Image: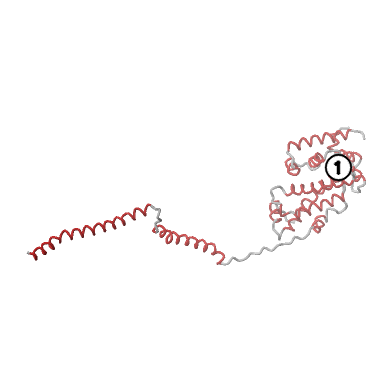
Amino acid sequence: MNSEKDLEQLKEKNPFRVPEGYWEGLTDHIMEQLPEKEVVPVVTRKVTMMEYVRPWLYLAAVIAGLGLFFKVIAPKENNATPTDSLLVNEQSTPASVSTSAKASTNEDYLEYVEDRYAGYVLSGNLGEGE
Amino acid sequence: MQQYTEDEIIQQLHDPTLQREAFARVVELYSEKLYWQIRRMVLNHDDANDLLQNTFLKAWTSIDLFRGDAKLSTWLYKIALNECITFLNHQRAMNNVSIDDTDVFLLEQLKSDDYFDGDDLQVKLQKAILTLPEKQRIVFMMKYYDDMKYEQISEIVGTTVGALKASYHHAVKKVEEFLTKDI
């Protein structure tokens, strides 16, 4: 027995059968068994103008807020000059200097006036005495 | 019926309004091929018919998951094959057959099937096929009867082409040996 040849020959013949008319109604029969699928309607909601603009409004508000912060609040904080800042010493130094200078100027002025008019006063007093 | 390409059918399968109509085309195209694939695995007509229905039912319920990465026929063969394997496992459990034993018990069912006209040599061939391990049997049937390409079998079975070639070669040898035996 040539098994290789047998195998090839056996392939040619299909020993299986199907009932008469099986193929004719098969597609319809299979389709009848399938459940109906629920068609979910796609609801498309109209986006209002406000909904569309809202994120941009929020963004604009945030930017405006930040702008206000840096323009108005931040410069004031710089002018407030914290006490541990070097600027304090630099700025306070001329103030104290001017105060002490003012004080010394007053003293000098008084001294000057005293020196200037002391002679007149004294000479007047002496003249009266003469 | 109008002819559509596979891509067009896949597109229609994902359109809820055309889905059922497109699926009817799929059934029309593949039902016969799938039937024979299943029939050769389970041998009995009534079982094959039930498994064919189940295959299309499974395909229908999971059609939304099919993205078209594989061919439609490959996807359907895969579902059919899984159905057959599940069915055969159930049959083995019913007949107290261990997983290592052959499925020769199916031969008894074949002999009593009204829709089997094979002679002794055909019965012997079916018996030889049933002595093969399950995976070898699947590869043998796909190649021997349907002359399927190894690449497609590889996609269905999930084994490399090299392993499939080896499997088929062993299967053919075993079947030929079995046919030369006097039983």
Q: Position of residue B87 (x, y in %)?
A: 84, 48
Q: Chain of mark 1?
A: A
Q: Nearer the viewer, residue B21 or B134?
A: B134
The vertical placement of B4 against A120, above or below, is above
The quarter in which the N terminus of chain B is drawn is: bottom right
x 77%, y 35%: residue: B166
Task: Assign a secondary structure to mark 1.
Answer: loop
Query: Viewer-proximal residue, B67 or A85?
Result: A85
Horizontal side of B143 relative to B108 (left or right) equals left
Which amino acid type is shown beneath numbered disc 1?
Lys
Residue B33 appears anywhere in the view: no
How many numbered discs sit on the rendered protein?
1
Q: Is A1 in front, or is A47?
A: A47
Residue A98 horizontal/vertical position (percent): 28, 57
Q: Which residue is mark 1?
A: A13
Q: Give the x, y percent position of residue B12.
A: 70, 56
- Name the quadrant of the C terminus of chain B: top right
Q: Residue furthest left?
A: A130
Counting other residues with Cα less than 10 Å from the Cα at mark 1, is it few (<14), some (14-19), or many (20 or more)? few
The correct choice, above or below, for B178 with respect to B68 in the image is above
Q: Along the horizontal axis of the image, is B177 left or right of B11?
A: right
* Quadrant assignment, res B152: top right
Residue drawn 70% across and 62% down?
Answer: A40
Colour logic = secondary structure
Q: Quadrant of residue B142?
A: top right
Image: A126 above or below B80: below
